[in-house]
Image: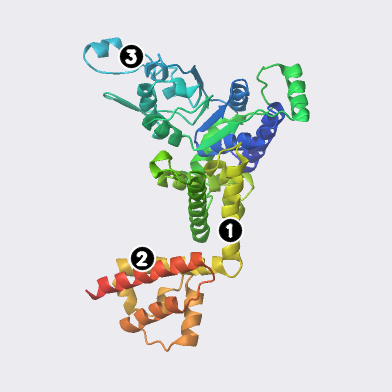
Amino acid sequence: MDSQFSLEEIALTIKQAQEFVARRVINREEVIEQAFCAFLTGEHLLLQSRTGAGKSLLAEQLFACIEGARTFRVQASKEQQPDTYFGGLDIEKLKTGKIFHNTEGSLVESEFGFIDEIFDANDFTLRALLSLLNERRLIRGVQNVEANIHTVIAATNYLRISEVTEAILDRFLFKAIILPDKDPLIQFKIGVQYSQHSNRIIAPTKKIPYNHLYRLKRMINGLDSTYEFRISAEMLYFTNLVIRHYEFARNRGLREKFKGHQSNEYSDFYISPRTQAKALDLLRALAFLDGRTLADSQDVRKLSLIFATAGLPEETHLFDKSFTAVFNSLNAGNGFEQIRTLIAYESLLEQIEKDPFILQQPLDKTLSNSQLRRSLLDWIKDALQIDHTVQQNKKVLESFLKNLIPVCDEVRELKNSLEKETTKIFQQIEN
């Protein structure tokens, strides 16, 4: 570990950089927060707006906050071929029938990229970019090399919908629509900035060292255990409940909007398992930005940064409603504690499935290091006489689950699933 690397110092530097960009690019705090979350998680950001809304200025001002990294810049067009992004073809190898790019100076060897008017690129080129953006690999013909890409910011004046562009959109975890702001005070502040700096990019006094940002990203992604940013089991379950509620609410809104239309006339709102999994990286990043190593419920509230489009308040508001509905449902009673208990029960089931011999041992011994121990053993003491036979242990576990009274529908759903899982595992053991 670099002796100069300090979580406290890099957190302060990132906060200062975020404030610096916000002073330079007026009234764009939400998308600036998205951008720094993209830097922390190694994800990509898509900016959409009408011409002249400052997308390029914002992107370049963000990149100016990083030192020790290469940035690739390109204006997309329909005439371009993949070698615009990957580097020119090696002519000698092409003569032998092999496609091989000289990647020096290309997007492949750059840590950051800015693609202006990305949807002006043809579908052939966009398709070639998919693995580069997602897997961070250049895969063309016989060439398969690792790319250095950390984050790409793309800008567009419009969305072009096709099978390929939908796949490209899925690669950009963070999305923002930048709408012109006609508020007189905002216009005045923009005018002041322009009169002082025109459209020049201003470097902050202190930049973020890229090697430190890269190490921090690996910690947030769980690839470096020097510092561990954690998400508890119950918070993970809660996160999935909120995401599901939001997805349902978005689709309910679509059905109401297109009432009387055929279902094939509009596309359902869909959150892919990949996006849902990557939300966990954002939870860890948000905990870090708040000076914590353990994610909490307020971090879950801010997942609107990826599930809602910045600049569209109605989407952010709907996500907040979903969060509030699920949180209040669990928090009204002891829902979070019940989820914690049921997840610990599920962990015990997994152990039993792997090693049925566990059922032949006293439960208090089996549960000595488990979160389930106090809840289950206190219940056993009050409800059952225990003799540690296999049948009795099965009865204890089944009865404990049966007698748990859920405080809300979300807990009831988890309990019902575990009752089915318990029956399945015990039947497997008996057979």
Q: Quadrant of residue 58 in the image?
A: top right
Provide the residue designation for mark 3. Answer: 89
Q: Is residue 382 visible?
A: yes
N-term mark: 1 or 3: 3
Residue at label 2? Answer: 350
Q: Are marks 2 and 3 in contact (CB under 8 Å)?
A: no
Residue 415 place in picture, x, y as percent: 44, 69
Give the left or right position of residue 337, taking residue 422 as reference: right
User: In terms of sequence position, does the residue under pointer 2 or pointer 3 come before the other?
Assistant: 3
Q: Which mark is residue 325?
A: 1
Task: From the viewer's side, name the closer residue of 76 and 314.
Answer: 314
Residue 272 placement (x, y as % from top left) = 42, 45
Looking at the image, the residue that sits furthest to the front is 260
- Mark 2 residue element: helix
Q: Residue at x 31, y 67 (%)?
A: 353
Q: In the rendered view of the protein, which quadrant contains the C terminus?
A: bottom left
Q: Quadrant of residue 97?
A: top left
Foreground mark, 1 or 3, reads: 1
Q: Residue at x 54, y 48 (%)?
A: 283
Q: Residues within 10 Å of mark 1 (few under 14, many from 20)?
A: some
